Image (cartoon, grey):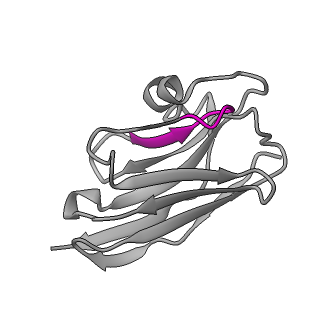
Amino acid sequence: QMQLAESGGGSVQSGGSLRLSCEFSAYFTSNHTMGWFRQTPGKEREGVAAVDWLGNTDYEDSVRGRFTISRDNAKNTLSLEMNDLKPVDTAIYYCAATKLKNNYFTANYYLRYIMTSSKLSAWGQGTQVTVSA
């Protein structure tokens, strides 16, 4: 079963930090590229960070250097460490993973072309992150 469950969202002031976690089911092995995207009302989904089967990572330009994605396959957990948060980071954050087994998407390709497709990626329910000025 494809299951992902996010936690760790909340409200912080500008410059603060949050750590998001995603527990995923055993369906998703180390071969599944995974990541995080975010969405705000009236805007399109935006890929934020991704990690592939080799452990390579990629980030959306506005979060590069502030966010860090990591994965612990032994604990079936995906994390997103977010530092120096800004009001523009306010959104619902979703954990995502490729539905296809043995797809071997690179982090770069998955971030830009696959992550936000409901046909190709499984998503969690999301967790709200609110950053106040």
Above or below: residue 98 compared with residue 79:
above
Using the image as rendered, state which of residue 81 and residue 127 is in the foreground.
81
Name the residue rendered at 42%, 71% in the picture: 18
The residue sitting at the left extreme is: 133
Q: Determine which quarter of the picture holds residue 4.
A: bottom right
Q: Determine which quarter of the picture holds residue 62.
A: top left
Name the residue rendered at 27%, 70% in the picture: 131
Left or right of 133: which side holds 44?
right
The C terminus is located in which quarter? bottom left
Residue 33 percent across, percent down from the top left: 64, 34
Above or below: residue 46 compared with residue 6:
above
- On whether residue 47 falls in the magenta region, the answer is yes
Residue 48 percent across, percent down from the top left: 41, 44
Residue 107 percent across, percent down from the top left: 54, 30
Residues in magenta, as a range: 46-56
Using the image as rendered, state which of residue 22 and residue 15 is in the foreground.
15
Left or right of 6: which side holds 130?
left
Using the image as rendered, state which of residue 30 and residue 133 is in the foreground.
30
